[in-house]
Image (tube, grey):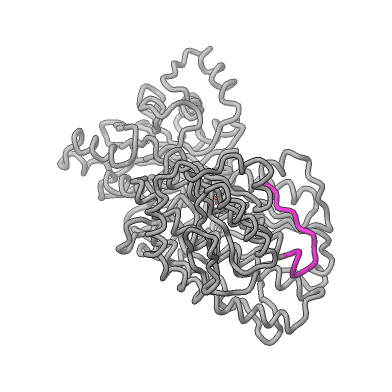
Amino acid sequence: MCGIVGFSSRSTSAVRPLVSGLSRLEYRGYDSAGVALESTAGVRVFKQTGKVAELDKLLKRELPEEERAKYTLGIAHTRWATHGLPTVANAHPHLADGGRLALVHNGIIENYAALRDGLERRGVEFVSQTDTEVLAHLVAAFDRGDFLAAVCEALKRVEGTYGIAAISARHPGEMVVARKGSPLVIGIGEKDTVVASDVSAIVAYTRQVIYLKDGDVAMVTPDGVDIHSLDNSPVSREVQEVDWDIGAIEKGGYDHFMLKEIFEQPDALANTIRGRLDPGGGTAILSGLNLSPRELAAVRRLVIVGCGTSLHAGMVGKCLFESLADVPASPEQAAEFRYSNPIVGPDDWVIALSQSGETADTLAAVRESIRKGALVSALCNVVGSTIAREAGRGVYLHAGPEISVASTKAFTAQVTALLMTALKLGRTRRLSREAGDRLVREITGLPDLVRRVLAQSEAIARIAEKYASASDMFFIGRGILYPVALEGALKVKEVAYVHAEGYQAAELKHGPIALLSEKTPVVALLADIPGKEKTLGNVQECRARNAPVIAVATEGDETAAATDAMVVPKTCPELAPIVSAVALQLFAYHVARLRGCEIDQPRNLAKSVTVE
Ligand code: G6P
């Protein structure tokens, strides 16, 4: 949530790297953007509301090419508003010390009101409504000649979360960065050093990176990086190599990242599965879980925490754990879990699901579960992310970078990883080797099944055309397909701005059916799972109210009762959620495209929500 870029070089102008870095981070927030550039003459700031392209236009107007070379140090930010409207005044960087100090910030300063009061009493005037401006003035107030020490002193007084980067005309050539609860990565190039809240803004320059840890404060100069703790003692952090390159975060000929990521799913899932199935033993090898069969056998209950799409994957996980391993499982919205004084302890296995590994509520749930002594694992996509590190054990999805704000390949990879986890847990209990083997074979064939759904893209686009103008839609499913109904509705809301509701198929008649008419399409999940016949009955109820029904049905089994059908290949119930979800992703994509929506960056959303 919000993106930070910093650039420090001996000879290269920082302007272009900062702007292109921001464009790569735009998925983190995109309501306003800004840069601060330092030269011997001082700090200059450019801010604009709207997307990074608007900032770029402003820079083109106000900073001619010939002037750019002198700015070799700068910081930049793309914002997702928390405190204050998306205005130029509230956009980052924020200034202090009479415009000499500039600071960008991700996260939330919880005690900002008290800090602001104190600063105002000392005569500081604020120009924005943000919590960040408080931080800028606080750093300036502690600046007695040592920039890093000033940042440390300021941060010691701050409650909340931050990833920050700051520059000051009083300290030419220096950039200080720090993190607590909001990611920050430093890329070590041959000539340049790049700082960003996400490696995707760094890989264009270098794949050698340092992931800062909470409590780290670093001085970045063209000569290198010095990392300290908040009490200003030196710490050392290892340089790691990013294992993917720039191609992974470019559109590669697709119109949108969302479509590219939908189409990447066969490969993404092959990567999630690779090396993790044991056909001889009929089980999964998930060494990152680091759990012995004895520990697995001792698990009495599973709690799966996540938000948004990850929560929906967790709901599918519940069905898988209960049916394959006979272990009760409860999916919990991570924020609710955290504030409900959750009853978890040593017999419980808490699995945190997060594509980004940075979602604040999910992280808080992980911390609370660790405090309560539960066994905690994380299923994350982003390697080295905070949730993955704090959980200490888990399964990386290896789905590759997901740029589109609406999550697609991470969802199917999460469900696949959960299925393998359930298989492994099941094999410590009642699941026979034969049953395990059957699943191993099914999972091995998953990438091909998904390919067959993708081949339906044009057919799904034609169905989308019929319904793209609807202003309300319903998605129904039961059992393991109920969470897919929720996810299908979420996708349509997120990218197409259509009001959509996901319902348990039988629940529709307990109220929502009052809303059905010929104007409310109902998408019915009818892949082959136990209970399908009952859902067919619910379809009839919808048809009897004149609602058009779009079935997501198994090949050769398209129900005559439906108005239209999206066809998915025949598979076992455990994989039905994945093939059905892919069809719904395509449907949402095409509806959004036909409605002319901003597909990759829908209004008001951010990919990684690092505030509670
Ligand atoms: C945001 C995104 C969603 C995502 C959710 C959880 O709301 O817009 O697409 O599902 O966060 O994110 P995570 O990274 O924890 O999976």
Specify the farthest residue to the front: 544
Is 329 in the magenta? yes
The answer to whether residue 12 of the structure is visible from this angle is: yes
Judged left or right of residue 137, residue 289 is right
> Which residue is at 45% across, 73% downward?
451
Q: Position of residue 23 (x, y in %)?
A: 34, 47
Report the quarter where the C terminus lies: top right
> Which residue is at 59% across, 63% downward?
526
Q: What stretch is highlighted in magenta?
A: 321-333
Asked where in the image residue 338 lies, by quadrant, the reply is top right
Relative height, residue 156 to residue 516 (above, below):
above
Relative height, residue 261 to residue 486 (above, below):
below
> Which residue is at 50% across, 54% downward?
407
Judged left or right of residue 63, residue 130 is right
Is 386 in the magenta? no
Q: Position of residue 475 (x, y in %)?
A: 56, 51
Q: Count numbered badges in the picture.
A: 0
The answer to whether residue 233 of the structure is visible from this angle is: no
Q: Which of 215 and 315 is in front in this view?
A: 315
